[in-house]
Amino acid sequence: MKILVLGDVMGFSGREAIKKYLPEIIEVNQIDFSVLNGENAADDGKGITKEIAEDFFSLGIDVITSGNHIWDKDETTRYIEKERRLLRPANLVEGSPGKGFGIYLSKNKKYKIGVINLMGNVFMKKTNDVFVTAKEICKKIILKKNVDFSVIDFHGEITSEKMAMGHFFDGISTCFIGTHTHVPTADTRILENGTAYQTDIGMCGDYNSVIGMNKENSLKKFFKEKDAVKHFPSKGEGTLSGIIIEAEIESGLAKKVTRLIIGGNLVK
């Protein structure tokens, strides 16, 4: 079983990288299931639209996760109620539209994959306790009981929160990855109980930037220059960043994990 997970898609550059590389990656690596974080995929780098989501699905993405920018486009609150393949963080305030986790079929329809979308509490607004929510979901998504494999996307700001949660899921999930900071960390590995892990898998977008935003304007904002404008995405050539997990059919746990960095100016 091969699972592909891609980091936050950032604006036009990120979408173009997905369009350019994803179909071939799926074919060459014989990917059975694919997930990406789409919360920054809109042109302004904030939110996702129905059109963009459906483009991702047409290119081979099976589930789209998200984070703190999920509601930045008004249409998303309606679309997410109808499209179960688009997830929002499970620990958002009670009554939020859509779902934070689900069970899906692999591309060959043979296996069930649970996907859980969580968001950290530190520096994030309007979230319930993510550790309490994780415990509750673990009673509903159970590896080798009601799912064959499972993927956790933890959208968070700080590394300690992500690492702690990774250890909580170790041995009860196929993989646990972090998103949100847009910078891939160098700790790709399999934890001691068999869960593939990376603190942050980076972004799919232009790395000649400040976490995907135009670097010249970002510098102006940091220096408080008067001609600085609202942040906007960099539009250079995008890099596709994520991981591929190879999992055992019998246990549902990882046996190999490989960083995936293709295109643009980020060198693996």
Image (spheres, grey):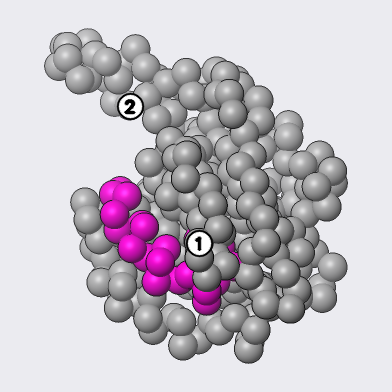
Q: Which of 25 and 50 lies nearest the eye of the viewer?
A: 25
Q: Quadrant of residue 86?
A: bottom right
Residue 49 shows in the view? no
Give the x, y percent position of residue 105.
73, 72
Residue 134 shows in the view? yes
Give the x, y percent position of residue 176.
50, 61
Q: Amino acid at mark 1?
A: Leu
> Who's the residue at 84% across and 43% down the image?
28
Give the x, y percent position of residue 199.
43, 50
- Estimate how packed mark 2 is, as few (under 14), some (14 to 19) or many (20 or more) residues with alpha carbons within 10 Å: some
Give the x, y percent position of residue 189.
54, 52
Q: Quadrant of residue 238?
A: top right
Residue 20 vs 175, above or below: the answer is above
> Who's the residue at 73% across and 35% down the image?
21
Find numbered disc 2 in the image and state the secondary structure of the residue it sits on. Answer: loop
Q: Which residues are magenta?
A: 157-176
Which label sits on residue 231? Answer: 2
- Residue 173 part of the magenta segment: yes
In the picture provided, is 128 more to the left or to the right than 145? left
In the picture provided, is 208 more to the left or to the right than 220? right
Q: Which residue is mark 1?
A: 191
Find numbered disc 1 in the image and state the secondary structure of the residue it sits on. Answer: loop
Instruction: Identify the residue at the far front of this view.
Output: 192
> Who's the residue at 26% across and 71% down the image?
128
Circle nearer the viewer, 2 or 1: 1
- Residue 244 part of the magenta segment: no
Q: Amino acid at mark 2?
A: His
Q: Which of 151 and 42 lies nearest the eye of the viewer?
A: 151
